Image: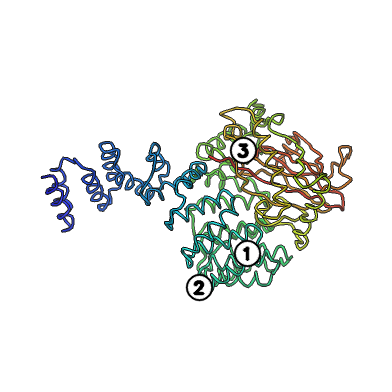
Amino acid sequence: MQTDVYQAAVAALQRNNPELALQHLADTGFQRPEHWLLKAQILFQQHQSAEAIAVLQQGLLKFPAASQIRSTLAQLFSRQKNYQAIIDLFEHQQSVPDAQAVAALFDALLQLKYYKRASKLSRQLKGRQDKTLLWLQVKLLLETQQLALGIQLLQQALQLYPGDLHFRHSLANAFKDTGRVADALPLFLALQRDFPQHVEICYSIACTYYELQQADLCEQWLKHTLELAPNYVPAHESLNKLYWGQGKTEALHSSYQLVMQRYQPHPDLQASLISQLLRSGQSEQAADTADQALRAHPAEARFHHLKAVSLSYLDLDEQAFPFYLQAAAMAPDSARYQIDLANHYLKQADYQKADQHLQAALPQNPDNQELWAYLGLVWRLAGDERHMWLNNYDHLLRVMELPVPAGFSRKEDFLFELTQYIRSLHQHQKRQPLDQSVRAGTQSEGHFLASPHPLVQAFRRSVEHCIQTYLAALPKDPKHPTCRRNNGSYLLNGSWSVQLGRGGFHSNHVHPAGWLSAPSYIEVPACMSAADPTKSGWLKLGETCLGLGDREEIAREICPQAGQIILFPSFFWHGTYPLLSAEPRSTIPCDLQPVN
């Protein structure tokens, strides 16, 4: 009888009569999983997603072993980007046999960066050749910086799916990210021949030529990218970076102007142009452009904010204030807007209001290191003892000697070889980067520690030894923004080499997206010493970028030596004293993120 009624419900739905189908389903008493599935399907087709999910959840309570209900729920949660709900669905399941359910769970784990659990699931899937699952396994390896294994799996995937765009593009990018730029280029060019209108492929070719120091070809491909997609912001910003590095100041922003002459300017393009004008010191033009953008897009908080920043760069803080206030009111969860508004109050010594705005952004941005940096500053200036808890230099700042890697009998021999390698990376760079803290120095491209070069990997092993020692000694504190995230596992999510010349320094800064920061010192001038009264090239911690005069405080000063690594939370303010020597100072900084 139930079967007949169920079939009648299916037939009614096929005749496009969902109301009759629901009536028939009610007569079944919902005694089988498919009854719940069909009701959810009807509700979903009627755009009642929440009701469909509630029905499936009820069905799962009655039939907890019904894999199809669980799988369908996972797919609906995936559409809503409710990744934690997907993970909770499979929390106590020994296996996830359905391919779609596996894919939904795997993707959810990656989205929330639960890499340990994703790795366990990946091991359970070994041997399965489903295309989506292969892609997710590749994504896991690439995101966890297991690039060599990622390349190997990509090559296996391309044997099964030789024409797949994503596998081919990812393999080329993986080669580029590991320093195998000459191997990446022909893959990108072959992709472009097959997909000539693909904007990201053309952009990748431009970036590859940049790393090969072929500036003319880089410029050609960036311009070609913008012919395909005039509002593609990364290409505009890369052109600016190229022109800046070549000293072609007359060409800066020319691509933006060309597009804006031909088309109605896109708000993303306008926002990018304002930021680029500010970085290159053209604050008046930035303010004028922000005015134009505000007239066109008065409801966009970012343009109120960019107008405020432009005025601040012109030392017009009082005129900037209402724009900061408006941006923060329009987007109260934005860490950036609340920080900049708090800075206005901080400069006025109104520490209560500064603290209020920083705290307002904290619930939605609990790991934003810049928020914590400014909270620590406000607490110090207000005489609040919490700043001593937060900026606990005695326990959170460590200077360590890098172990001598296997294969080298002396530290000096290893550092000499690594120094020569770093110098080779910087020999073609002539100017400080446009968008970094480096002044009168150069910075390498890409992820330095991802390079398969034997020297780099030997250095990486030494760094990781020090990191593990540091993590093991961190205090246990469930409230501290650094300590509470320490579970002993981490990813090196950024690394680069920096070479400072005479007069070079790092401006005071923090790393907003970091957790821990760890610069290693490879080459330091002979004149750098603890007895040097000028403190040439020294690291300083605690002084901000705000220029608060006698309210500033340098909490620690360190004269680093070659072969040392210094570890500290990414919210610690840090910069350097200018280098007075003609001898270069070479470092390899890296940022760490905890693994969930």
Separation of residues labelled 2 and 3 (CA atoms): 55 Å
Place of residue 542 in the rendered image (x, y in percent of width and height, measured from the top left): 72, 37
Q: Which mark is residue 345?
A: 3
Q: Earlier in the sequence, mark 2 or mark 3?
A: 2
Q: Nearer the viewer, residue 523 or 280?
A: 523
Q: Secondary structure at mark 3?
A: helix
Amino acid on which disc 2 is placed = Asp
Q: Secondary structure at mark 1?
A: helix
Q: Is residue 377 visible?
A: no
Q: Give the side of residue 408 with respect to residue 328, left or right.
A: right
Place of residue 210 in the rendered image (x, y in percent of width and height, measured from the top left): 67, 65
Q: Secondary structure at mark 2?
A: helix
Q: Nearer the viewer, residue 80 or 95?
A: 95
Q: Is residue 488 above or below residue 50?
A: above
Q: Nearer the viewer, mark 2 or mark 3?
A: 2
Q: Nearer the viewer, mark 1 or mark 2?
A: 2
**Residue at x-position 66% and y-position 66%:** 182
Q: Give the side of residue 7 with respect to residue 301, left or right.
A: left
Place of residue 62 in the rendered image (x, y in percent of width and height, measured from the top left): 25, 36
**Residue at x-position 77% and y-position 59%:** 424
**Residue bearing mark 1:** 207
Amino acid on which disc 3 is placed = Tyr
